Image: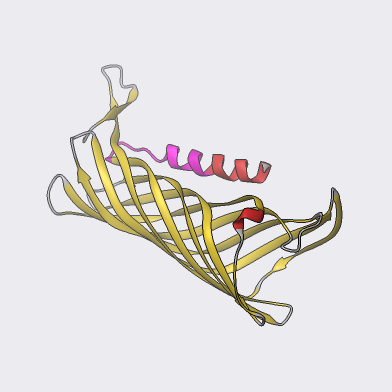
Amino acid sequence: MKKALLSFALTIGVCSMAFSLHETWFSVGHERAFLVETYRFHGNTIDTSTALRGVNASTYRFFTDRTGIFVHGSLLFPTSGWVWDNDGMSNIDFTLHAMNMQIGLIMGVAFRFDFTDDFKSYLGIGLNYVTAIASYFGQGGGNVSYDRFTRTLGIGADVGLKVDVTDRFFVRLGSIVTFDFAKHTSLDIFSGTERTSSHSGWNESFFMLGLRPYISLGINLFWIADENNRLRLATGKP
């Protein structure tokens, strides 16, 4: 739980720091996610499909009229899932999970294309990092439980449309698209409160594809200098 809170705090902190003298977009919103994953474990090929939902926070900071950087952070919770392995297909029972969350962060370069002053499209491309934390019980019942901590690394893109409702406030509609190629998993197995075994390592033959549509509400921000040349944060368009 401490790792989850630290990762989420870092994500929000990075998003909140990305302001500049040029136009900056800061927004929060609702995000859905659909993930397809495959990897090998002890000679068994495992495929999973998971649907999630949650919240996001995003910042676009522009150095010119067209280019800049972006940060997109998300906190997602699974709602349904399926797994395919040598035993066939089965449903993932999330009612057995005491905790299950994913914390994601994408950072990279950003581009904008203005159709009008109030209607814009944007594209961000960068590195994608996801931390997933789960604590759950075995499907056979009893007092066996599992704590799993995973980290994945890949590339991600953010594409969408931005509509300025006023000079200060806007609505964004878009989607994150991700391709992850590396995953590290740590798994602790408990009998009651006693840890009976622990496993850690990189997953073999891993890749994961993700589609994460979202809608968000935001505010336009920029820094201006007052009569004493002190910078202050202002809302609206520069």
Q: Residue at x 84, y 48 (%)?
A: 193
Q: Residue furthest left?
A: 116
* Residue 69 image offset from top left, x and y in percent: 37, 50
As drawn, is 97 to the left or to the right of 105?
A: right
Can residue 124 be spotted in the picture? no
Task: Locate residue 91, reporting x and y percent.
Answer: 58, 68
Magenta-drawn segment: 11-23
Q: Is residue 135 above or below residue 164?
A: below
Q: Nearer the viewer, residue 20 or 220?
A: 220
Give coordinates of residue 233: x percent, y percent: 33, 27
* 120 relative to 218 in the view: left or right: left
Describe residue 42's horizontal placement relative to residue 162 as left or right: right
Residue 67 position in % (x across, y down):
29, 53
Quarter location, residue 204: bottom right
- Choose between 69 and 140: the one closer to the eye: 140
Q: Is residue 198 visible?
A: yes
147 on left or right of 89: right
- Quarter occupied by the N terminus: top right
Residue 13 in the magenta stretch? The answer is yes
- What residue do we see at 29% from left, 34% from top? 222
Quarter where residue 115 is shown: bottom left
Q: Which residue is pictured at 28% across the width and 52% down the height?
A: 173
Q: Residue furthest top?
A: 228
Q: Quadrant of the C terminus?
A: top left
Foreground of the two, 122 or 93: 93
Quadrant for residue 189, please give it: bottom right
Question: Residue at the location (18% across, 35% down)?
Answer: 166
Q: How is the image coloured?
A: secondary structure
